[in-house]
Amino acid sequence: ASCASRVLRAARLSAVCLSAPMRIFLTGATGYIGSAVLDSLVRAGHDVTALVRNSDRAAEIATGGARAVLGDLSDPDSYAAAADAHDGYVHAAFDTAAGRGPDVDRLAVETLLTAARRPRTSSSAVPASRFFIYTSSLPVVGRVPEPADEDAPINPIPLVAWRPAVEALVTGAGSERLRTMVVRPGIVYGGGA
């Protein structure tokens, strides 16, 4: 199965019904994983708001059927207000600029989790719970002598040694009203994005 289908399956397994149209905030919508997630969500009839860095990317997103928000992961003020009031959040971006990727990633997760936890006015169109999906990476598990599942002990390679703390932040934020998940894609490749 594709990475995007795994992310969407994670959302379905979280007891959040994706059959009814939902408002979803997506980061990384122009990357390999995010673009596939965007396409799947739009085709399923969801209202997607995607964070992008520039107007060229915004035009791509609009062509793909989503609403673009110009902003920068490292500047939460540029997107925090736009992230409010969504039913679901998919964080599929990673900013490698200036070698601050891990710090920027944690900042983005904290900002989006704050938005996901914020109370909203209830109505029949508002789902009872929201979801938050964090895209991590399989190297968090590290070398294992046999097949591993989500309960396998982790031994991250140095490049991603910071990710377990962010994963714990995400899973620790889960509650009755917020379903949280971590997806660890192994290898991502393709011909587009």
Image (spheres, rainbow, N blue to C red):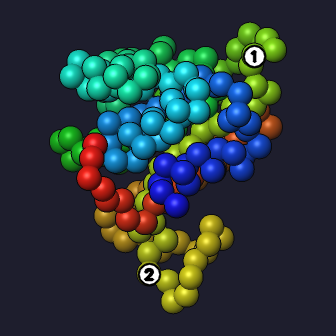
Query: Across the whole image, how many numbered discs are drawn on residues?
Result: 2
Give the left or right position of residue 47, taking residue 73 as reference: right
Q: Amino acid at mark 1?
A: Ala
Residue, x 21% and y 41% (percent of image)? 97
Residue, x 60% and y 39% (percent of image)? 132
Horizontal and vertical percent position of residue 84? 56, 18
Q: Amino acid at mark 2?
A: Arg
Q: Secondary structure at mark 2?
A: loop
Give the left or right position of residue 123, taking residue 43 as reference: right
Q: Can see residue 54?
A: no
Q: Earlier in the sequence, mark 2 or mark 1?
A: 1
Q: CA distance from mark 2 to mark 1?
A: 45 Å
Q: Tag on residue 143?
A: 2
Q: Nearer the viewer, residue 80 or 190?
A: 190
Q: Tag on residue 157?
A: none
Q: Can see residue 135?
A: yes
Q: Nearest to the eye among marks 2 and 1: give it.
A: 1
Give the left or right position of residue 130, taking residue 51 as reference: right
Residue, x 65% and y 44% (percent of image)? 11
* Residue under numbered circle 1: 125
Above-or-below relation of 151 to 192: below
Horizontal and vertical percent position of residue 181? 62, 49
Mark 1 crowdedness (10 Å alpha carbons): few <14, some 14-19, many ≥20: few
